[in-house]
Amino acid sequence: MKFIYILLGFIALGLGIIGIPLPVLPTTPFLLLALYFFAKSSERLHSWFLQTALYHKYLKTFDEQRALTLKSKIYILLLSTGMIAISYYFLPSIYGRISLLVLLLIEYWFFFFWIKTIR
């Protein structure tokens, strides 16, 4: 099981790194997954990841305080809402569109009520 967590951690890390220049692929969720998988797999990999610049730039405040700045929240919500809106426009199924709207509501609920805002 340890090997699977390591493999999943590196896959998530790779997707997170690819997501930095690509606006379509989110960076932070993949890096959070990598952090989780490395913590589950190996103390050495977890310690290594905590020392990287990626962790310090994208995850440190969220990991330590479970909070994001207002600027980060707005950026993430605008980008994800735009991607969901594009998907909504091109999706022919009414059930798919309803699913996307439910996903959007859950996302906004999560950002407004679960993640604290750093002033």
Image (cartoon, grey):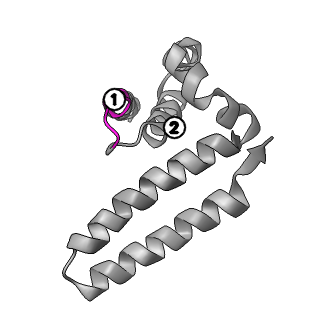
Local SS, label 1:
loop
Is 3 drawn above or below residue 43 in the view shown? below
Front label number (2 vs 1) = 1
**With 107 as the anchor, is 60 left or right in this view?**
right
**With 54 as the anchor, is 62 left or right in this view?**
right
Percent from the top left, x then y, of residue 3?
Answer: 34, 28
Asked if the stretch drawn in magenta spans residue 20, the answer is yes
Percent from the top left, x then y, of residue 29?
Answer: 47, 43
Q: CA distance from mark 2 to mark 1?
A: 17 Å
Amino acid type, mark 1: Pro
Percent from the top left, x then y, of residue 24?
Answer: 31, 45
Which mark, residue 21? 1
Local SS, label 2:
helix
Q: Earlier in the sequence, mark 2 or mark 1?
A: 1
Do labels 2 and 1 touch, CB within 8 Å? Answer: no
Residue segment shown in magenta: 17-23
Front residue (pair 41, 36): 36
Percent from the top left, x then y, of residue 30?
Answer: 42, 38
